[in-house]
Amino acid sequence: MGFFKQLFGKKTEVKERPPYYSIVCPYCFSKFEPDAVVFRAAHTKEHDDEFTLQEDEKLNAWRRKFNLSQPDMEAVIEPHTIPEENQIYSENVLVAVTDRYGITTRRRLCPNCHNELPILSGKVPSNIISIVGASQVGKSVYMTSLIHTLQTSTASNFGAACLPLSAEISRKFRQNYLEPIFERGMMLESTNPNEQQEPFIFQFVFKDDRQAPLTLVFFDVAGEGMVERDYLDIYAAHIKNSSGILFLVDPLQIRTIRDKIRLSAGEEEGEFASRYDEPREVVISLFENFIAHQQGSKTDIPTAVVLTKSDMLQYLKEEDSEYIRPNSNVFRNFIHKGHLNKSEFENIDGEIRRFIEKVDRPFQDAIDVYFQNTAYFAVSALGSNPVNRKVTGVISPVRVDEPFIWLLHKLDYIDRRDAQ
């Protein structure tokens, strides 16, 4: 439990810390115990077939799904081949082995896809947050804006840091996402399923080392994946073993809203996608590939339903409007510090629930049927709609971190209360 939970929350029975935690791989999302890991050798030997550079079939099978190159790798070491005295444990978790050449490796791999695991895997809960949404919903832009906001302000407000899992992820994120949008104001091209793609993995690490880090995994795969069965094989395990879900919904996916905004915006409308998938189709795909296999055909994973591009709703605002009023919380940024502000959260959750109910009742009904633990939010990743794929003026994200902060609360990291 976090500090604020202890200070302001109800007294709860302190849970005894288990000797170790199950691991969820942040690459293939399989779940296994820490003693199932394998290791990547820390060296090669040309004249020893077991220790030469070699093809790693499991890693290559995973990399092929993302059109990634498949270089030869150092050998994979199975711990059962290593004498017990050469196995190194830390906090009841196998963290290293020393091979027959006396060389120690700490490169633990997932036994199913052979990607390298985060250092703390097994010592802390594998709390993974996933992001889903249909084609054209703006997942890549939201991911960029969320990570930027977490790194520049949110993490500090909650005594934490938001860090990429590796230097390579840091470089790719900066070059391909952060700099184009936040430095040049240019929009990203739609994700091409034939180009190299792999998960972007960040960790929200608390300065209080009694708090487990939270892992954010973003699949920047082509959005069509959420309504096409081929991609959903990857997503099923991804979502099933997530601790929280960010479910993105573009108001322009909703036909009644799209038509009203077009009419009101006129020549100022900016970017409109050529095609949209209905939000309900994404829910149906999730049901077919994941939710239907859960107990009671429902999921209790905390799910933040996030209405993106909220700045577009300005074209609907009217006094006494049945949709959005000029004084709506949607158009006002709010910064949560140290806790989830109860009244702010309840206001935005209630307003967006009512909005979705009015404009897309079938989607609302589908969410209510299949998801047991939901909250509703509205965010603008940029603060305005791009024109000719370029943002004019200063990029000013609105409430982009609020759904993430709600998930922090649902996972018992922070408290929910009114400001004192």
Image (cartoon, rainbow, N blue to C red):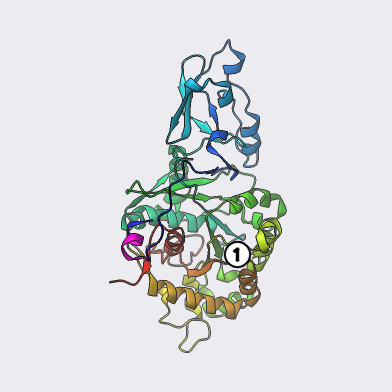
Question: Would you say 62 lies left or right of 124 here?
Answer: right
Q: Amino acid at mark 1?
A: Ala
Question: Would you say 22 lies left or right of 338 here?
Answer: right
Q: Residue 292 placed where, x, y %?
A: 70, 60
Q: Quadrant of the C terminus?
A: bottom left
According to the picture, the residue beneath numbered tag 1 turns out to be: 273
Task: Tell me if mark 1 has few (under 14), some (14-19) or many (20+) residues whose alpha carbon lies within 10 angstroms of its own.
Answer: few
Q: Quadrant of the N terminus?
A: bottom left
Asked whether residue 140 appears in the rendered view, the answer is yes
Outermost residue, top side: 47
The residue positioned 38% from the left and 60% from the top of the image is 414
Secondary element under disc 1, as helix, strand or loop, is loop
Indicate whether residue 60 is drawn in magenta. no
Q: Residue 184 placed where, x, y %?
A: 41, 53
The magenta region covers 4-9
Question: Would you say 360 lies left or right of 181 here?
Answer: right
Closer to the camera in the image, 100 or 377 = 100
Above or below residue 192? Residue 80 is above
The residue positioned 43% from the left and 58% from the top of the image is 412
Would you identify the image quadrant in which residue 396 lies? Answer: bottom left
Above or below residue 39? Residue 221 is below
Q: Residue 375 placed where, x, y %?
A: 51, 69
Above or below residue 120? Residue 339 is below
**Count of numbered marks:** 1
Would you identify the image quadrant in which residue 273 lies? Answer: bottom right
Closer to the camera in the image, 19 or 168 = 19
Q: Residue 25 placed where, x, y %?
A: 55, 42
